[in-house]
């Protein structure tokens, strides 16, 4: 979040252009940096490489931050804004997947990718492409940059996920106008996103419950949605949101005390 401070004063148009440019530039820069970036171990939390280039690829995820800032600066009260998000998001997401498939789903390309995985089994390759690559692009063929697999950090992965998010935000804005009371409960988890995501990430660790499996998504969705609804009904902030709010409020008050009068 600290990295976003220099961009807080940017206009939505400039933020959108930067986010769109980074969809392509970010993955290319990641591939280049990964060739010389050292692997520093961070005890208990993987390596510094994981958090910059791999499982949590901050370098490419910057585009999500910039896009989020751009959307937040738009007039979300207008129906036209919601419809624009739905239209552009849905169209772009479909286009990204279709173009990626056209580029990758060719026998010579698939064989080249399979060889990089040390296998000639195209079935194994398809399994990896469908389930994602944990943020890492295997070395070898440049065709890896054309895949749209989940969590692969490629231009097409970023385009698909970012565009899908735009469409979902648009749908939620429309739903909030049509069903304000129902959506208010569902928005509880989103209103405490720092707490929600922190718990979600913790629950995915090896020592947490329940163990990660196919149905884990639905378990997490039901649990965090329910917790968010309870906090919403109680009119409470999330625990981590409360801590951040307390710190920022006290820091602001302290800064005002030490600011000399004009």
Image (spheres, rainbow, N blue to C red):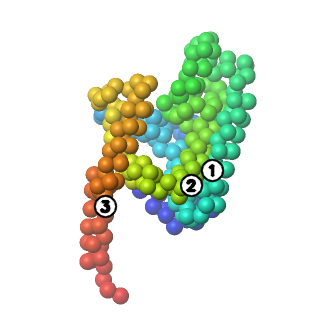
Of circles 1 and 2, which is in front? Answer: 2
Q: Give the mark, 3 or 2, whose residue is nearer the N terminus.
A: 2
Foreground: disc 3 or disc 2: 2
Q: Residue at x 47, y 44 (%)?
A: 58
The residue shown at (38%, 43%) is 225
Which one is nearer the viewer's eye here, 200 or 136?
A: 200
The one nearer the camera, 254 or 236, is 236
Between the residue at mark 3 and the residue at mark 2, the CA separation in whole angstroms equals 29 Å
Which image quadrant: the C terminus?
bottom left
Query: Residue 198: x percent and y percent?
Result: 34, 43
Q: Residues within 10 Å of mark 2 (few under 14, many from 20)?
A: many
Q: Give the mark nearer the N terminus: 1 vs 3.
A: 1
Name the residue that disc number 3 marks.
Answer: 245
Q: Secondary structure at mark 1?
A: helix
- Rendered residue at 57%/41% (across/down): 161
Q: CA distance from mark 1 to mark 3?
A: 32 Å
Residue 147: name its quadrant: top right
Residue pointed to by mark 2: 174
Q: Please tell me which residue lies in front, 88 or 1.
A: 88
Mark 2 residue element: helix
Q: Could you tell me residue 163's position as x and y percent? A: 61, 46
Name the residue tied to disc 1: 86
Residue 81 at x, y = what percent? 62, 60
Q: Earlier in the sequence, mark 1 or mark 2?
A: 1
Vertically, is 143 above or below 37? above
């Amino acid at each position: 979040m600290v990295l976003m401070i220099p961009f807080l004063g940017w206009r939505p148009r400039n933020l959108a252009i930067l986010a769109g440019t980074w969809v392509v530039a970010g993955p290319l820069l990641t591939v280049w940096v990964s060739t010389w970036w050292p692997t520093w171990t961070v005890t208990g939390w993987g390596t510094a490489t994981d958090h910059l280039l791999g499982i949590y690829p901050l370098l490419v995820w910057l585009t999500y931050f910039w896009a989020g800032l751009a959307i937040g600066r738009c007039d979300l009260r207008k129906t036209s804004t919601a419809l624009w998000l739905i239209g552009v998001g849905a169209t772009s997401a479909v286009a990204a997947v279709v173009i990626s498939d056209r580029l990758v789903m060719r026998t010579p390309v698939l064989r080249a990718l399979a060889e990089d995985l040390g296998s000639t089994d195209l079935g194994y390759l398809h399994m990896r492409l469908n389930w994602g690559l944990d943020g890492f692009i295997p070395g070898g063929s440049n065709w890896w940059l054309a895949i749209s697999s989940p969590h692969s950090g490629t231009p097409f992965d970023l385009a698909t996920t970012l565009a899908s998010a735009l469409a979902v935000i648009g749908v939620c804005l429309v739903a909030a106008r049509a069903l304000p009371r129902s959506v208010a409960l569902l928005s509880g988890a989103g209103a405490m996103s720092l707490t929600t995501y922190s718990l979600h990430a913790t629950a995915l660790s090896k020592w947490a419950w329940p163990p990660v499996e196919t149905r884990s998504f639905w378990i997490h969705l039901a649990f965090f949605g329910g917790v968010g609804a309870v906090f919403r009904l109680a009119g409470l902030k999330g625990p981590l949101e409360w801590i951040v709010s307390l710190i920022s409020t006290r820091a602001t008050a302290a800064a005002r005390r030490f600011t000399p009068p004009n």
